[in-house]
Amino acid sequence: MESRSRYAGQAQSHRVSVVDDDPSIRETLAAFLDAEGYEVSLAADAQGFERIMRTTAVELVLLDIRLPGRDGLSLTREMREKSDIGIILITGRNDKVDRILGLEYGADDYIAKPIDERELLPRVRNLLRRVGHSPAANGLEVFRIGQCTLDVRRRRLANDSGRTILLTTAEFDLLCVFARNPGRVMSRERLIAATSRRRWDPLDRTVDTLVRRLRRKIEIDPEQPTLITTVHGSGYMLSD
């Protein structure tokens, strides 16, 4: 079991954790992220990562799905119930079902092994920018969506009772796109660009997974959605 903080002392650096049971992957990613100016902490399993979280305000975690003991999917679901930390899953090339489950459980993105650092870096940067609660617009944006209110500047979705509804970064970004374009059909290509900055693949079900998650949070009956509706062959639309 391994847990350690490295490359500390960079006051303005973002705090990123790498959780993978393969020491070569941990060391490679740590060296790469350190060279890019990030403060990196490492763990080999869920217990090691939890120890890091007790002492460090980690902003983003690169999390291997197939950890020994408590796996990355279980850890993702537990983290998402209490935190809006950025989560990028590290998956195998053939782990398509696990990727979908990971997104269902609240992950923001995924990257497949072997990891291409040129692909990883923009994803880390983009997600950290979004997790960092940068203002999404210069002016005040408050939208009424069904029985909920979305306050973009405060990054808060609340129901009519005033209870905050926790959104992942990807869910928040997706809901903002819908809120700013009511009554317009939004293609999967545009939606995936807004939530992950990855190139659209017709076989990629990321957007569909995020829409299902949003429907569970804002629809009265997620199985019979009336707010975010499917436009077959085109994408999705928020009813105005």
Image: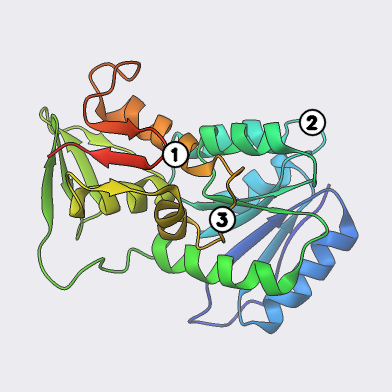
- The image shows residue 121, relative to residue 154, as above or below, that is below
**Relative image position of residue 101 (x, y in whole percent):** 61, 31
Q: Residue at 13% x, 29% y: name it.
A: 147
Q: So how many labels did they put on this image?
A: 3
Nearest the viewer among 103 and 41 is 103
Tell me the CA gap for discs 1 and 2.
27 Å
Q: Which residue is mark 1?
A: 210
Task: Check the image and name the residue furthest to the front.
Answer: 233
Q: Residues within 10 Å of mark 3 (few under 14, many from 20)?
A: few
Q: What is the spatial separation of the Cα atoms under label 3 and label 2, in whole angstroms?
A: 22 Å
In the rendered image, the vertical position of residue 28 relative to residue 48, given as above or below: below
The quarter holding residue 168 reads: top left
Assign a secondary structure to mark 2: loop
Q: Nearer the viewer, residue 171 or 229?
A: 229
Q: Residues within 10 Å of mark 1 (few under 14, many from 20)?
A: many
Q: Nearer the viewer, mark 3 or mark 1?
A: 1
Residue type at numbered disc 1: Leu
Whether residue 173 appears in this view of the structure is yes
Q: Residue at x 49, y 35 (%)?
A: 209
Query: Would you name the residue on which mark 3 appears?
Result: 55
